[in-house]
Amino acid sequence: MSAVRCWLIGLVATLMPMYGSLACGGQSGGVLPRDLVWTGCGGAFQCATLDVPIDYNHAGGKKVTLALTRLPASDSSQRIGVLLVNPGGPGASGISLAHFAATAFPANIRARFDIVGWDPRGVGQSSRVRCDDAPVPTVEPATAAPIPRSTSDPELQAAIALGEACFRGTGELLGFVDTESNARDMEQIRLALREDVISYIGYSYGTFLGAQYADLYPSRARAFVLDAGVDPSLDRGAQIEGQAVALERALHAFLSDCAARPSCPFYSDGDPASHLQQLRLALNASPIKATTPSGSSVTLDGDQMLGQAVGNGLVSGNWGRLAEALADVEYRHDGTGIARLLGGETVGSNPQNTGAANLAITCLDTTRIQSQAWNQLIERLRAVFTEFPLTTAPPSPECEGWPFEPRWRPRELHAKGAAPILVIGTTDDPLVPYEWSQSLARQLSAGRLLTWQGHAHTASFSHPSVSSCIDSAVTAYLIDLKLPGEGTVCQ
């Protein structure tokens, strides 16, 4: 659901923990925000804006503006309350997710809840991060030498220049797009809605946000669904290794499935794994040209472009589409399908600025890796993941040149005193290891894990191939506060 640029560059993306708590006892504090003024903005949707403090340590100071949208409950007589939604990223648009929910969420959810989406600070229609269309520093393939971290290193210089461009375009806000500030914004939204409690569904990075809110304001969390739970106790190195494991696991699952089915377009005489490696090497030796859906021309090599496309295909969960795209390249030298799988943007080029916001939030929410530890991490990745090196490219160093220090140190989140929280984990999720969802559910004082034996990134209300078991369990929890049984596994 949140297949955004920074999650996929190099296919070993950096996940985003969050800044530690400043509040205690779940108290909101500060001045009650004004009532929201809703206006029609297409169909049944209503839109509003809300001004919130840039810095909650100085709540009376400068403000930023959040853009919100609301789909009112279709059956007001049966209305339960508000369901806030966040798609993850970080940097993805909650407004877009609310529009997606209008058709994708079950009718009884839409009948009983006002669905409220907002673009978090730094994102989309809210006060946003701007980086002057600066390009992202190049990520070298996994066969590159260990990354030097001297001040003369070209990659580090490019990262510093990128950070400076983002600061020029964004100003003071760039230092306050961290996840704790976003969680405090959620509380301002609750107050502005005049709701005693809120329900919430967050995907991927949105589980960080939801867990952070529940930890800060446990008495205000009615029913929280955290789909593809991220472990907030991990440092950056552990996150990168975990994502590499998840992506490698998903790739093996895809290839094993294809090898077992002669009808798979990339069956390759029952050995798609070898054919994928041959294709990777062939494209490195002789890249081919292809055209993306936007009409731009790309050169498809093996380590970066093919690797990124494979990662995107795994994240989508659409194995058939990925197999067809690989078969088209191998047998017909047609890269159109691979080009369709390529996401990517230069930071700041997208009207909703997903990449720029992702980078800015990540750099505040993640610990830095020092030069020696970084190179040791790369060597561990190479040593462990030798069969499919296209999934183990080293991460990009943008955050090392960031103009603001991280505002978070890894720790567990317990949300003591909160109502039961439902965490969903997918066994072959290519971006968020299943083990992270297990860990998050254990950390939360009232966490309950629901498992999907599947292979896409996120499970609920988003994939037609998902068993109705997941959607039914989530619906029962949101409406009736009924949790699935301990150890429930959906096929």
Image (cartoon, rainbow, N blue to C red):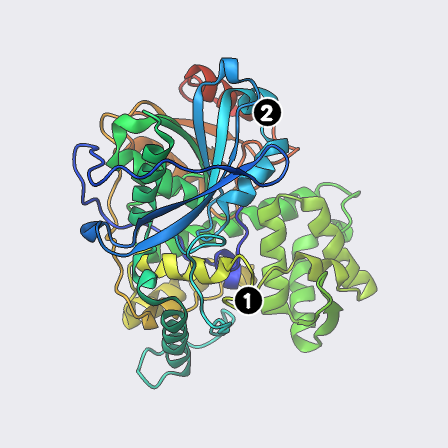
Q: Position of residue 167 (x, y in %)?
A: 36, 70
Is 379 in front, or is 194? 194
Q: Position of residue 134 (x, y in %)?
A: 48, 74
Q: Residue furthest left?
A: 24
Is 122 in front, or is 383? 122
Can residue 386 be spotted in the picture? no
- Amino acid type for the residue under numbered disc 2: Pro
Q: Which mark is residue 444?
A: none
Residue depicted at x 70% and y 74%: 287
Q: Earlier in the sequence, mark 1 or mark 2?
A: 2
Q: Residue furthest bottom?
A: 152
Query: Residue 61 vs residue 147: left or right?
Result: left
User: Label 2's element?
Assistant: loop
Q: Is residue 72 above or below residue 278?
A: above
Give the quadrant of residue 261: top right
Q: Residues within 10 Å of mark 1 (few under 14, many from 20)?
A: some
Q: Is residue 339 above or below residue 47?
A: below
Q: Position of residue 349 (x, y in %)?
A: 55, 66
Q: Quadrant of the N terminus?
A: top right
User: Label 1's element?
Assistant: loop
Residue that label 1 marks: 349
Q: CA distance from mark 1 to mark 2?
A: 34 Å
Is 317 in front, or is 347? 347
- Amino acid type for the residue under numbered disc 1: Ser
Query: Residue 109 vs residue 156: left or right?
Result: right
In this figure, what is the number of numbered marks? 2
Is 430 in front, or is 115? 115
Residue that label 2 marks: 106
Residue depicted at x 56% and y 25%: 110
Can residue 23 be spotted in the picture? yes
Query: Residue 415 vs residue 247: left or right?
Result: left
Q: Quadrant of the C terminus?
A: top right
